[in-house]
Image: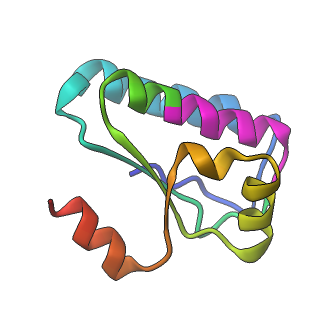
Amino acid sequence: MIRPTGPNIGQRESPIITEEFAPYFKQYGKAVKFLVLDLSTVSFMASMGLGMCIACRNQAAAVGATPLLFGLNKDLQALMAMMKIEKLFRIIKTQAELQQICSK
């Protein structure tokens, strides 16, 4: 699970987050079943943050993991829909749903 510390993900934070999660895909490879991007503490995301989400998704897809977005507030949900990024992820709305999916 990737849980960036909010409230903003912008130009400074995006490369830091990307560098932090990349080694896990190299280390665990196809053993990774899900990539959960938990944005529950994030209230604003700049274009670099959107790029970071896409980079996360692409790394997950490369190892066959299912990319999940969790904890989106209404503004982020609208932004993801407007930019069509939500089509790249499965959107998870509740903790119970997240636990159910990840326990499979």
Magenta residues, dominant SS class: helix
Along the viewing direction, whichever of 53 and 84 lies nearer the viewer: 84
Q: Residue at x 32, y 81 (%)?
A: 96
Along the viewing direction, whichever of 10 and 78 lies nearer the viewer: 78
Q: Position of residue 3 (x, y in %)?
A: 50, 55
Q: Position of residue 84 (x, y in %)?
A: 73, 47
The residue range painted magenta reads 45-57
Residue 4 horizontal side relative to residue 35, left or right:
right
Quadrant of the image containing the C terminus: bottom left
Question: In the figure, 82 relative to 99: above or below?
Answer: above
Instruction: Tell me, yes or no, whether the highlighted magenta stretch contains residue 56.
Output: yes
Q: Residue at x 79, y 35 (%)?
A: 48
Q: Work out whether residue 41 can be spotted.
A: yes
Question: In the figure, 21 relative to 40: above or below?
Answer: above
Along the viewing direction, whichever of 13 and 55 lies nearer the viewer: 55
Residue 1 horizontal side relative to residue 47, left or right:
left
Q: Position of residue 13 (x, y in %)?
A: 72, 40
Q: Residue at x 16, y 63 (%)?
A: 103
